[in-house]
Image (cartoon, rainbow, N blue to C red):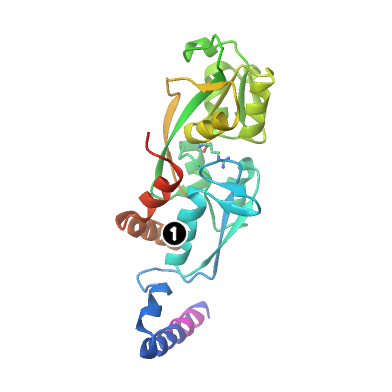
């Protein structure tokens, strides 16, 4: 039955494509290309839009590197992108339960997460950095021991700092920006978070700086429900195309200015 439906759809699509071809050949570039395995109407992206420059809100609009790359992927696959904003900590579960088509949130590939979801090819590198007050006595990673560290709940910054400095020293916040506010207020001594958000939080708040030493280097990728291999393959193929034609680099360059 499913096959029949797919076949009918494919046939309809071909007819529509040819019909379009007759008068407006160029219009076909917007349609999904036969090289993809699935047919998608709407793709739902689970994210946590409090993580500039990857995903954040500009007024009521979702913007950022991930939002634009996801939008380009959706277009490439002939779909409309819908953003579902949630706690970072809920994204993997939402992917596992099929509430969203994929998760994209500056999300680091880790072995533990790989047991829960599949990851696309990586589209960016992330670095965990340490934010401290400008006049802080903390100058190196070693100085962090015994200090109060703020993190965003469920992030790799959270996981690594609990491992390295002890859970009792780590305060977990729903948003990175809340951790930064706690740092400003003196409730924590340092914040461990991805470097690009760190830069944007430091730029937006006076009296803070980022340590020169990187805490960890990681790969960002898109999380997809296990077993959903058509979508995984299609996202990877679209990502490959958008990387080869410069779209991904252009999007990144728009949000991250070379230093
Ligand atoms: N890269 C880190 C991780 O995967 C942090 C990502 C947080 N992303 C967000 N949109 N809040 O754990």
Outermost residue on the front side: it is 206
Q: Is residue 9 magenta?
A: yes
State whether residue 72 appears in this view. Answer: yes
**Left or right of 134 in this view: 11:** left
Magenta-tinted stretch: 4-10
Give the vertical position of 12 relative to 77 (above or below).
Answer: below
Q: Position of residue 173 (x, y in %)?
A: 67, 31
Give the vertical position of 91 relative to 137 (above or below).
Answer: below
Q: Position of residue 89 (x, y in %)?
A: 62, 40
State whether residue 96 appears in this view. Answer: no
**Left or right of 221 in this view: 171:** right
> Which of the two residues, 14 or 166, is positioned nearer the viewer here?
14
Q: Residues within 10 Å of mark 1 (few under 14, many from 20)?
A: some
Question: Which residue is depicted at the point 37% across and 38% down?
Answer: 258
Q: Is residue 210 magenta?
A: no
Residue placed under numbered mark 1 in the picture: 229
């Amino acid at each position: 039955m499913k096959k029949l439906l797919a076949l009918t759809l494919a046939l309809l699509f071909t007819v529509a494509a040819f019909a379009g071809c007759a008068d407006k050949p160029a219009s076909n570039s917007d349609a999904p290309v036969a090289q993809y395995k699935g047919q998608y109407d709407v793709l739902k992206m689970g994210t946590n839009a409090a993580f500039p420059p990857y995903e954040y809100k500009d007024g009521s609009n979702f913007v950022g590197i991930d939002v634009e790359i996801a939008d380009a992927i959706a277009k490439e696959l002939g779909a409309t992108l819908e953003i579902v904003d949630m706690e970072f900590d809920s994204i993997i579960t939402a992917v596992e339960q099929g509430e969203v088509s994929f998760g994209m949130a500056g999300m680091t590939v880790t072995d533990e997460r790989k047991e829960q979801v599949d990851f696309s090819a990586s589209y960016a590198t992330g670095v965990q950095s340490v934010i401290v007050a400008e006049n802080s006595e903390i100058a190196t990673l070693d100085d962090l021991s015994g200090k109060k560290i703020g993190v965003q709940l469920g992030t790799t910054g959270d996981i690594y700092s609990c491992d390295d400095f002890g859970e009792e020293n780590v305060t977990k916040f729903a948003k990175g920006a809340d951790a930064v506010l706690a740092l400003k207020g003196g409730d924590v001594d340092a914040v461990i978070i991805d470097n690009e958000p760190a830069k944007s939080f430091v730029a937006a708040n006076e009296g803070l700086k980022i340590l020169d030493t990187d805490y960890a280097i990681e790969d960002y990728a898109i999380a997809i429900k296990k077993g959903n291999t058509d979508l995984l393959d299609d996202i990877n193929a679209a990502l490959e195309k958008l990387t080869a034609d410069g779209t991904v680099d252009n999007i990144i360059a728009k949000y991250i200015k070379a230093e």
